[in-house]
């Protein structure tokens, strides 16, 4: 169908209105009129078809991999969206089927898990969150959106905003760590990056806040497992990032796989109808996770697909992703009066609203420009952008021996480890259309950085997994012959992500043993960690004086790591998820509560372990620099805060070291007496500042009344008069303290 004919069809279907659409989801009367006009023309079968999402079922040759024919379903008006279809040519082919061959010519919306980049892969989200740089995080999502949109996509299933305190859960790599305040800020930044200021623009894509809700609290850190948390903790810890995403205008939400309070999240009216669409007045669309509607049968709350469909649509799930429950059962349920058609209309209205906001009714092929696809894919500006993100994602854990930054006194560098010459594993999990051939790995990055001035020698030593020690002797000999050794150890990209839970978080295989052998040579060692989750590093912390947490940094990993190793960039990352001493300490997090018997050294009947400290090995907010920052006293503009007042906080921070650097100044509060127990510290502000050597900057914060409130199980927000403590520092364990009264 030509564009003119398509526009004519738009006039027939709805009142055509020219103009940009806002991605801030206040009621837009023009779009609502168009949605209603299309809805009035639809049969019940066509409505339910819009609620069905199918995955691409073709292999690389275009052959169908399933028994059913996707094309037949599309032409029958039984598909509203597709996922795992990317590339302009393929997207256009399916879109033409929907536009040309269905009665109402309603376009499809195409989605993909663009979690941390489409082809130009950024650091995994857990890593880039360690930058604490909201502008950088937003720009990273913007880069991904531009590239994905150029490949024909309009929708990403990101950001994942689940709060996670258990590193055994593999999906921690997709999120922003353990703190709801920081998680909320990052959620809003990523939504803004994906969606921009105009969702109908051809270089933006719809975002999806997932997984709603509590998925990060799965028992035992085991993926898809049961979740059991109180309503108060749900509201205080797990809901804030989702609410921040909703307030930022996120186009869609995704149900979680887990149950909560005995009800699978996909079938929870409390979560979706009461909180999301009720309390928050959310008018976007909710999509199930893959097959999660049908999985309610396996959960044991539905006896068949018909019952699963009834539960899901009643709860407020608008689109069934790869569950086939809606298209197989909903029409019959409506005909029999079991499901009101008004529920179907509400769901379809949300689906159509998304398509209008994306501009697909105005031009269904707006995302299908082959020249733009070529121009935007892996462009130089995108590689430069993700290199900047990668540098700020790196966290310096130890530099006790002052080896870093590496300088000219080292004439030979030994690169040892299974991740030194390994481009594929730099991509991390959920890397969309990422390709290892596009990656600058660690070896390449270091070799390019030093040129011919330093001899670089390499030995693999061992594999990431397994017990093969046949490469030890070569690696040990190389270590003896070099001035310094850079050990590249950690996880491969398949050891974290969905379905990748682990109970043992030490370095896999024989990597720690290899590290021990190299350490015994006496050659200085720099340990580079490439991983998708916090690891257990008790031995490493005690025995290795130089440790750099590099995470999985994407296509520019090697260049970013070299920038840090050789001092081109002074590391500034701070952890967003605590590292445990051992697995028995999990869950471990900074914002714990004191209990009625807080820890006192050498006391038996207090909360403690006999064989391990209470606090993390490396806490949330921790991260070193090549320079040192000194904090002055915290100044408050008032000692007593009345309702409606704002407290102004200031603290001088001085760079007293030898290098220019950046510092994340963090502000925490503690309510000393409240009607329900409160954490010992709660993050309530942060600023990332740049200081030249010897420079002092006075950092200022404002603490409003809302920062001192907390939420009860019924959703109400309350505050208590009394004494509050306020802490400012470079991490929650090393702070300057002040106090004030709330009247």
Image: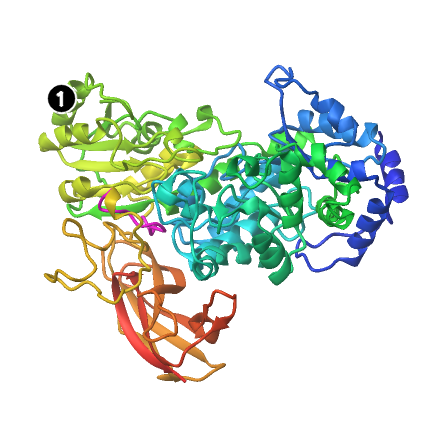
| Mark 1: secondary structure | helix
**Observer-nearest of 571 and 144:** 144
**Observer-nearest of 544 and 721:** 721
Which secondary structure type mostly characterizes the magenta part of the structure?
Answer: loop
Screen quadrant of the C terminus: bottom left
Number of on-image labels: 1
Q: Is residue 580 magenta?
A: yes
Residue at figure coordinates x 12%, y 62% from the top left: 603
User: Dot 1, how many residues are within 10 Å of its Cα: few (below 14), some (14-19), or many (20+)?
Assistant: few
Quadrant of residue 232 within the rendered picture:
bottom left
Region of the chain picked out in magenta, as a range: 571-582
Q: In the displayed structure, does residue 355 sit left or right of residue 140?
A: right
Q: Judge whether 364 appears above or below 177 on screen.
A: above
Q: In the displayed structure, does residue 543 sit left or right of residue 639?
A: left
According to the picture, the residue beneath numbered tag 1 turns out to be 477
Residue 205 seen in the current view: no
Identify the image's colour scheme: rainbow, by chain, secondary structure or one colour.
rainbow
Image position, residue 437 (x, y; %): 45, 23
Screen quadrant of the N terminus: top right
Image position, residue 527 (x, y; %): 23, 37
**Observer-nearest of 106 and 645:** 106
**Observer-nearest of 56 and 6:** 56
Q: In the displayed structure, does residue 105 sit left or right of residue 84?
A: right
Q: In the displayed structure, does residue 691 sit left or right of residue 9?
A: left
Residue 27 seen in the current view: yes
Q: Judge whether 151 appears above or below 725 on screen.
A: above
Image position, residue 320 (x, y; %): 64, 38
Image position, residue 133 (x, y; %): 43, 53
Q: Is residue 324 magenta?
A: no
Residue at figure coordinates x 49%, y 43% from the top left: 258
């Amino acid at each position: 169908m030509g564009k003119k004919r398509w526009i004519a069809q738009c006039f027939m279907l709805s009142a055509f209105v020219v103009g940009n659409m806002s991605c801030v989801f206040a009621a837009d009367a023009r779009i609502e009129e168009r949605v209603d006009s299309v809805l009035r023309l639809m049969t019940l079968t066509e409505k339910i078809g819009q609620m069905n999402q199918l995955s691409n079922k073709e292999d690389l040759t275009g052959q169908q991999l399933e028994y059913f024919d996707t094309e037949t379903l599309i032409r029958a008006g039984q598909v509203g969206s597709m996922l795992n279809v990317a590339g302009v040519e393929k997207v256009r082919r399916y879109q033409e089927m929907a536009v040309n061959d269905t009665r109402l010519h309603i376009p499809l919306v195409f989605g993909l898990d663009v979690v941390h980049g489409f082809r130009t892969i950024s650091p995994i989200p857990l890593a880039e969150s360690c930058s604490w740089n909201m502008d950088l995080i937003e720009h990273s999502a913007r880069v991904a959106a531009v590239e994905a949109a150029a490949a024909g996509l309009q929708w990403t299933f990101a950001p994942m905003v689940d709060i996670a305190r258990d590193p055994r859960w593999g999906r921690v790599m997709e999120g922003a760590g353990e703190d709801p305040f920081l998680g909320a800020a990052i959620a809003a930044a990523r939504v803004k990056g994906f969606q921009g200021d105009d969702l109908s623009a051809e270089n933006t894509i719809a975002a999806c806040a997932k997984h709603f809700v509590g998925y990060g609290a799965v028992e035992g850190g085991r993926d898809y497992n049961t979740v059991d948390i109180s309503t108060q903790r749900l509201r205080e810890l797990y809901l804030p990032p989702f609410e921040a995403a909703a307030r930022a205008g996120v186009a869609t939400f995704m149900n979680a796989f887990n149950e909560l309070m005995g009800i699978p999240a996909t079938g929870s009216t409390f979560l979706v109808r009461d909180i999301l669409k009720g309390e928050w007045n959310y008018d976007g669309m909710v999509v199930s996770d893959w097959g999660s509607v049908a999985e309610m049968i396996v959960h044991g709350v539905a006896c068949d697909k018909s019952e699963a469909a009834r539960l899901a649509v009643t709860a407020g799930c608008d689109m069934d992703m790869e569950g086939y429950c809606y298209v197989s059962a909903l029409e019959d349920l409506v005909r029999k009066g079991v499901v009101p058609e008004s529920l179907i209309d509400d769901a379809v209205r949300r689906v159509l609203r998304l398509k209008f906001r994306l501009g697909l009714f105005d031009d269904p092929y707006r995302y299908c420009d082959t020249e733009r696809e070529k121009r935007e894919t892996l462009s130089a500006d995108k590689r430069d952008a993700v290199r900047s993100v990668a540098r700020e994602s790196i966290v310096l854990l130890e530099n006790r021996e002052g080896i870093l930054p590496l300088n000219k006194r080292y004439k030979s560098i030994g690169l040892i480890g299974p991740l030194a010459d390994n481009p594929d594993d730099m991509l991390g999990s959920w890397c969309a259309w990422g390709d290892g051939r596009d990656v600058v790995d660690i070896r390449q990055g270091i070799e390019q950085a030093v040129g011919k001035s330093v001899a670089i020698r390499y030995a693999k030593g061992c594999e990431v997994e397994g017990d093969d020690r046949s490469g030890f002797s070569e690696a040990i000999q190389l270590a003896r012959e070099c001035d310094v050794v850079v050990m590249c150890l950690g996880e491969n990209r398949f050891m974290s992500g969905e379905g990748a839970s682990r109970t043992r978080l030490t370095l896999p295989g024989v990597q720690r043993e290899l590290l021990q052998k190299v350490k015994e040579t006496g050659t200085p060692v720099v340990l580079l960690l490439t991983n998708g989750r916090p690891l257990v590093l008790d031995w490493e912390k005690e025995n290795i004086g130089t440790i750099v947490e590099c995470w999985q940094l994407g296509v520019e990993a090697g260049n970013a790591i070299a920038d840090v190793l050789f001092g081109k960039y002074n590391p500034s990352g701070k952890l967003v998820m605590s590292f445990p001493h051992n697995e028995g300490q999990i869950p471990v997090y900074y914002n714990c509560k004191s209990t009625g018997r807080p820890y006192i050294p050498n006391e038996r009947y207090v909360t403690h372990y006999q064989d391990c400290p209470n606090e993390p090995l490396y806490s949330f907010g921790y991260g070193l620099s090549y320079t040192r920052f000194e904090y002055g006293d915290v100044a408050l503009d008032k000692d007593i805060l009345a309702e409606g007042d704002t407290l102004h906080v200031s603290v001088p921070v001085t760079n007293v070291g030898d290098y220019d650097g950046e510092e994340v100044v963090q502000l925490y509060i503690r309510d000393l007496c409240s009607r329900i127990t409160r954490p010992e510290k709660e993050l309530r502000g942060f600023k990332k500042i740049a200081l030249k050597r010897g420079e002092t900057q006075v950092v200022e914060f404002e603490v409003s009344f809302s920062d001192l409130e907390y939420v009860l199980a019924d959703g109400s927000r309350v505050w208590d008069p009394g004494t509050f403590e306020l802490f400012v520092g470079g991490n929650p364990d090393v702070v300057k303290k002040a106090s004030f009264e709330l009247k």
